[in-house]
Amino acid sequence: MAVHVVNVRRAFGLLCREMAEVIHLEEEKFSTHSFDSWRELSELQVKTKRPEDDWIRSVQFEVRVPRVIRLLKFDRLPKQKLHLSRRNVLARDDHLCQYCGRHFPTHLLSIDHVVPRSRGGATTWENVVCACLSCNTKKGGRTPHEAHMKLIQTPQRPKRNPLLLMKLDNPKYKCWRIWLDGACWEVGAKD
Ligand SMILES: [Zn+2]
């Protein structure tokens, strides 16, 4: 079951401490690797690097960044927490101003309280949206109804981590889909 997204440093930390193993998918076949066997496999591929792979270099060797690792030891599944952060709201709304429906770069977007805070509007997934600076200024401290502005969609708490969904559009993370589309998976008959 896909439980979490970790950065490369954390992933290698888990591999080196033998708390996780690499799950490698190649030509529709899965294989599992310890850090050492992954390093050996990486050595064989170092001359035929593909553009969609990432590599890290140490003093003595280069190793390919695995895309999926499996935890070998854990007490409980980590809780899926989704923080109501600016980054997550922008990702949920796909960087589209929820009033004019246009796409903007991050720095030209703001977070708008649909029902303004001054009117008792809460900071919740259902009451914050991404808005361009001009729509936000135009709306001011009013409700959309008062400002005669219509939301392009009703804001909701996302069912999946929106940043993860954004990453799925990147070919680098294509292999994640297998684990996200189906909830559970088994790794071969070895176990
Ligand atoms: Zn706008």
Image (cartoon, rainbow, N blue to C red):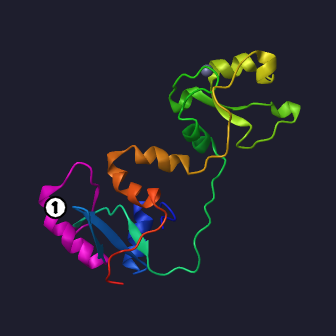
Going by the numbered disc 1, the residue's amino acid type is Val
Measuring from the top left, give residue 158's x and y in whole percent: 62, 46
Judged left or right of residue 176, residue 65 is: left
Q: Is residue 131 above or below residue 21?
A: above
* Residue visible at 63% across and 54% down in the picture: 82
Front residue of 175 and 48: 175
* Residue visible at 80% across and 24% down in the picture: 143
Which segment did they paint magenta?
A: 34-61
Measuring from the top left, give residue 1's x and y in whole percent: 48, 68
Tell me the crowding category of disc 1: few under 14, some 14 to 19, or many 20 or more residues within 10 angstroms, Cα based: some
Judged left or right of residue 67, residue 126 is: right
Q: Does the magenta stretch include residue 50?
A: yes
Measuring from the top left, give residue 95's x and y in whole percent: 54, 32
Front residue of 60 and 17: 17
* Residue visible at 43% across and 47% down in the picture: 167
Quarter the C terminus occupies: bottom left
Could you say whether the residue bearing mark 1 is in a helix, strand or loop? Answer: helix
Q: Does the magenta stretch include residue 47?
A: yes
Quadrant in which ligand 1 is drawn: top right
Task: Name the quadrant containing residue 59.
Answer: bottom left
| Mark 1 CB lies closer than 8 A to ligand 1 | no
Measuring from the top left, give residue 153's x and y in whole percent: 64, 30
Task: Name the quadrant containing residue 54.
Answer: bottom left
* Residue visible at 51% across and 25% down in the picture: 103
- Which residue is the site of mark 1? 46
